[in-house]
Amino acid sequence: MEKYTQKKLIIHDENQIPVFLKKGEFDPNFIMSELKKKNDEVFVTECIGDDLLNKEDDYFTSIFFNEVKNNDLKILLKTVYKKLKNGGYLIINSNQISLHKIELAGMMMYYGFETFSEHCLNNKKYIIAQKKYEKSKIEQPALSFLIKLDRVGRDGKNIKIHKFRSMYRYSEFLHQGMLESSGLSSIGKVRSDPRITPLGRFMRKYWIDELPQILDLMTFKIKLVGIRAMSYAFFEKYPQRYKEKYFKVKPGLICPIFNDENTGFEEIVEIEEKYLDSYLKNPFKTDIKLLFKTFSMIIKGTRSN
């Protein structure tokens, strides 16, 4: 499972607080042009050149790019990750970057950078991020409208689940950090999730984004009724006793957590574990009962958010 989550890096205490931070916040009075005058472990440039590439890895505490375009981002992040010390900071002038801020933050997290803050100084927009995680081991992020996402399957095996994209691209790489900081809604999702696009909210309201999972149903990756196939970051929140039961049952399309009347994560665990216990004793009866209950709720107008 470690392949599908990003580990936090060990950041040594001796790392100095950069000059552009003050009490943990960006110093609005700091002049970016002064950055290159501070010390040899800070690198300032307009593009990736030999003067950066020839430096040994894990050398700089901060790297500042004054001009960055969309097409340069991937190679920039990949290169800078190697050159920055753990906990080091990347500052980017983002005036020429046209990506949505969620997509940009997700792309940076894919390469191990957690966005620290966004600021505008002298009519220029800057993004500051910190090297806090390992780069994702997923080689090909799902970026198209029809996507395949890595999920925990039966026996702990990885399965690819199909969906229509309802979030900004690279959003899935923000999930791990958001679970730690944002909390969960009563149906086990991130509260007020900013990663969902306006079209995505409409699609989710009517379950349009879930339609491609019919492919997964037809290829027997999942069954009609059961616990939803979970992301690895979310699955890690569950207790070990639950995980052992989950591994024995194939994930499902129609799940026991249907509406938003639950009180929180502990109740989610309780409801799902009750389903697993029942299914392990009497699979057919359990799924038929849940299926009819779901149809009844749909007829009454109850919808999952």
Image (cartoon, grey):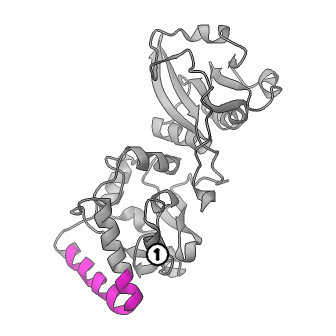
Q: Is residue 168 left or right of residue 74?
A: left
**Relative vertical location of residue 168 with respect to residue 290 in this rendering, above or below:** above
Residue 243: x %, y % from top left: 47, 71
Query: Does the segment drawn in magenta span residue 127?
Result: no
Image quarter in which the C terminus is found: bottom left
Q: Residue at coordinates 33% horizontally, 87% vertically from top-left?
A: 286
Residue 43: x %, y % from top left: 69, 19
- Name the residue that disc number 1 marks: 246
Per the rendered image, the range of residues in magenta is 277-297
Q: In the image, what residue type sits under mark 1? A: Tyr
Q: Residue at coordinates 52% horizontally, 22% vertically from top-left?
A: 126
Residue 106: x %, y % from top left: 52, 42
Query: Does the segment drawn in magenta span residue 290?
Result: yes
| Residue 237 lies in quadrant | bottom left
Nearer to me, 176 or 305: 176
Q: What is the chief secondary structure element of the magenta stretch?
A: helix
Q: Is residue 285 left or right of residue 84?
A: left
Nearer to me, 301 or 7: 7
Image quarter in which the N terminus is found: bottom right
Q: Residue at coordinates 56% horizontally, 14% vertically from top-left?
A: 19
Q: Is residue 148 left or right of residue 284?
A: right
